[in-house]
Image: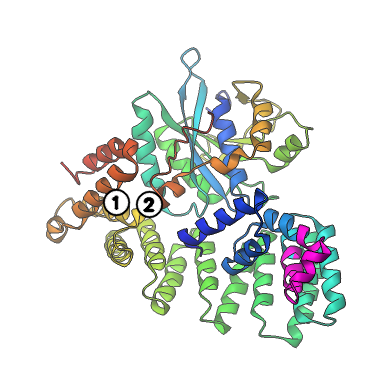
Amino acid sequence: MVGAAEEAQLNRLESQVDNGGGGAWEYLCLVRKLKARRSEKVLKHGLSILNDPKARSRLGGEEWTLYEQVAIAAMDCQRLDVAKDCIATLSKKFTGSLRVGRLEAMLLEAKGAWADAEKAYARLLEDNPLDQAMHKRKVAMAKAQGNISAAVDFLNKYLEIFMADQDAWRELAEIYVSLQMYKQAAFCYEELILSQPTVPLYHLAYAEVLYTMGGLENLQAAKKYYASTINLTGGKNTRALYGVCLCSVAINQLTKGRNKEEESSELQSLAAEALLKDYKHRAPEKLPLLSTMLKNMKLIS
Amino acid sequence: MGAECRYEVAQAAYIKLVLHALKHRCSPVSGLLVGRLSDDDASTVQIGDAIPLTHSQIGLLPSLELALIQVEERFGAQGLNVVGYYHANERYDDAELGNAAKKIGDHIFRYFPRAALLLLDNKRLEELLKGKGRDLALQLHTRDLSKSWRQAGLDGGNQLTIKEPSANVLLLDYISSEKWQDIVDFDDHLDDISKDWLNPDLFK
């Protein structure tokens, strides 16, 4: 998860480096810190540091971190020759290291040698059965081969051991959504909300799944979670504002206005107003479109 | 009805959807196709524009519903409809049309019975980028009488044509100047409403 401010900072630094303004190392550090996937840029700027002995020695011990970063970026860009060189250098320095062993197995993956990679991971896991990154590689490998049901199995087994890994719960939820297994996806988001009740993203994702499932009960719950997203974001989340509108229209269609509680609720008209205000300030050219839509939904007159 | 129906894609729609897929290389991307039946020949669907929708999960309804409502409202006034849907898969070597995409296709089909699903063909796109191929980097899928989606043109017929023959040349030009960075989809719009999903400045 990269926030908007952090992403802006990253983009600024990236264009500075691209235009020869320096700061390549700071850029690479930020990419690592945010876990951003900018492989092409990392490969380009990382390699130019590695190929310059002076710049490289200035890094001191961090040099090896950069080798690892460039190796992974190179695999992502299918520059296997570069990845191989980086990994060989690391392997010479850290003989028998688990972390380098993982890179070597990843290189097998990148080559498409799935069986060999699997063997390599199995061997590494024998000595370190609790290495989370390794378990996750197995999930990624299943996904890369299009074997989604295996990926789901691995993730479920993984989550039995590492229950607090929120990224893994999110990944599982997203896979379930892609398989249209909404009940299971909803369960994952419930886990996430329980463990981190103040993250608006989880409330929003849960609401979207509930809305997709449909039915009166789910729609009513979806509306509540959209409302809590609005609450947690101070009304800044466009998706949640729209969500409240969509839910109230869908609920009214199902109950044909018989639901007294719904009719008296001000929530949807407040959400509609907030949307109108937001569009007026930031996207005036889309305002007519929005107001026609809200009028058709009978949320504004 | 699928067999006799022909589809003519405008250059703008074609370039937009390929650039959209290139911008998000490691996610599935999708969008809507707008157009209308040709005036001269009612069995030809003219696909005039592509509206980039998402670069994340396509299995969720809310943003899709919003996009459909707004796109129909925006283009309905010009006599244009949503005539189809495009999709690019997450994995490079995945050339199958997924279930969620088919369901969205079914939905569009209810309102426009000649609906088309276009799937980005990664192999052909790669050939194009190498300067080898000349075909469109697209697969056309249409709904047959048994109500299932089938890839068209496998029997040698060509139902999918491009309006401007120079489209691929222009596309390569746009790719080499990294124009794909400028593509905005409906997802981006919902994150920041000042971004316009119509991409009015893309071809300027």
Are labels 2 and 1 assigned to the same chain?
Answer: no
Q: Is residue A32 visible?
A: yes
Q: Position of residue B53 (x, y in %)?
A: 47, 44
Residue at horizontal 58%, vertical 32%?
B14
The image quadrant of residue A137 is bottom right
Q: Type of residue at label 2?
A: Pro
Q: What is the chain identity of the residue bearing mark 1?
A: A
Q: Quadrant of residue A232?
A: bottom left
Bounds of the magenta span?
A48-71
Q: For residue A68: magenta?
A: yes
Residue B62 is marked as 2
Q: Does B78 sit above or below residue A221?
A: above
Determine whether A226 is above or below A91 in the image. Answer: above
x then y, percent, for residue A130:
66, 85
Name the residue rendered at 67%, 25% in the picture. B157
- From the image, which quarter does the C terminus of chain A lie in? top left
- In screen coordinates, is A207 left or right of B14? left
Residue A296: give x, y in percent of width and height.
23, 39
Q: Element at badge 2? A: helix
What residue sits right under mark 1 in the picture?
Answer: A246
Residue A66: image location, x then y, percent: 73, 68
Q: Is residue A53 magenta?
A: yes
